[in-house]
Image (spheres, coloured by chain):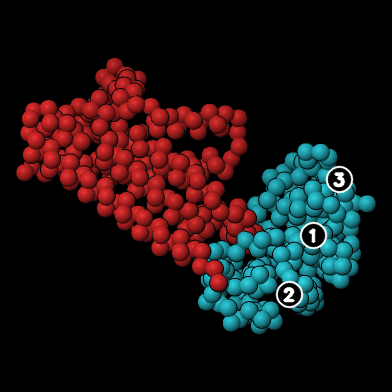
Chain colours: A red, B cyan
Amino acid sequence: MDITPLLLSLKIASIATITVAFIGITAARVITRSSFPGKRVLESVLLLPLVLPPTVVGFGLLYLFGRNGPIGKLLLNLFDVQIVFTWVGAVIAAAVVAFPLMYQSAAASFSNYDRNIENAALTMGASKWRVFWTISFPLAWPGLLAGLVLTFARALGEFGATLMVAGFIPNRTETIPLAIYFAVESGETDTAVFWVISILIIGFLAILWLNWWSGRNILRFTNDQ
Amino acid sequence: MLSLNIQKRLKNFTLQIQLKAVGEIVVLTGPSGAGKTTILNCIAGLSQPDSGQILLNGRSLFQEGKKPLPVNKRRIGYLFQDYALFPHMTVWGNIKYGMKNEQLTKDLMEVAGIAHLLQDYPQQISGGEKQRVALVRALATEPEALLLDEPFSSLDSQTKMECRNELLRLHALWNIPILLVTHDKEEAKMLGNRILQIENGRFL
């Protein structure tokens, strides 16, 4: 059995998760801590991929990153780089589709504890940077981790947008969900079953671990006498 | 010396406050929503007045038209109503977070009677103990002024008395201006060198 789809899926989902974690946590932190006109509109736009069919997201990305799209054209002219029909395209598709999960988890985590805990640290002379890393981040961490796992799982399972942006190119953009679809299409049931079971196991382990871990952490934080 | 002369537009009225405090305990009292906490927040730098100025020992904390001094540079201790202890750190972790001098802090902990709690987490100690930890934590940063927002409101009457006495003892040692917000008339009388009644953003 060729395990390229597994490796490719893990690579794409990992890179997408890291990217989304960085952007999602930063955006959630900045947006939840400030008030400006249009905040609700901006948040709605950020959460849009959650409610749109992935094919719509894929269509949008294809329009932006295609050879004639505004970003695609720019990348082609400046760096001679093409995103569409490459694994990078798959990363972008997975990242955009999974982004709302990270953003929502992070936004909830940062509003889940008393603001005065951060204020107290500030009055004690700590810089904003120190307050973030020693207070905000550890307090938000259980929720952030949940967001990370959900993002990774969503990115791993991404199909519709990936197919439209990255296409199905064996060994290059053939992630597990795509491999399943095209195995069924061509009657290779054994291959399809193998990948179905693989992704079931990965997804189940991720959720199981998360539940175990967060259960343990909630216990630690609510250890009332 | 802490001196402020500030104006800030709030929802239903304009806060207009003039106040000077040397090493004394000034009690701010008045109905809810009168602007008491807003005054403390303006001094700490958590919110900004619209105009006026705030000075602490000759340093300008806020001056109309200039960039206000950041919260972490003000050297003002702030005891929040619910203490705002860091739940993921032990008592010692909380206290040493902004500590300036370890020996002085250890003396403080002895005076406050919390030296035996150092390894406990805030969730594991009583309300009165939390209050003392928060007080020591604020004083360990060696502030030049101390703000207390209804610091004893969630304590039972016995613990309340102990903690008030504690504050008086610590104040006698430290002698910095203390601004204390309370609803409690008896508390105001017991602690305040001066009691200021505030209503709709002005002193009566």
Q: 10 Å neighbourhood of mark 1: few (<14), some, or many (≥20)?
A: many
Q: Quadrant of residue A192?
A: top left
Q: Is residue A184 above or below residue A73?
A: below
| Residue mark closest to the camera, 1 vs 2 | 2
CA–CA distance in space, label 3 to label 1: 15 Å
Residue placed furthest toward the top: A68
Q: 10 Å neighbourhood of mark 3: few (<14), some, or many (≥20)?
A: some
Q: Say if residue B53 shows up in the picture.
A: no
Query: How many marks can you see?
Result: 3
Residue name at image x 78 percent, y 69 percent: B176
Question: If the image is split into quadrants, where does the N terminus of chain A sit?
Answer: top left
Q: Mark 3 or mark 1, which has the lower sequence index?
A: 1
| Residue mark closest to the camera, 3 vs 2 | 2
Q: Amino acid at mark 2?
A: Thr
Percent of width and height locating residue B65: 74, 41
Q: Amino acid at mark 1?
A: Val
Camera-side residue: B51 or B147? Answer: B147
**At numbered mark 1, what does the secondary structure look like: helix, strand or loop?**
strand
**At numbered mark 2, what does the secondary structure look like: helix, strand or loop?**
helix
CA–CA distance in space, label 1 to label 2: 18 Å
Q: Amino acid at mark 3?
A: Asn
Camera-side residue: B156 or B139? Answer: B156
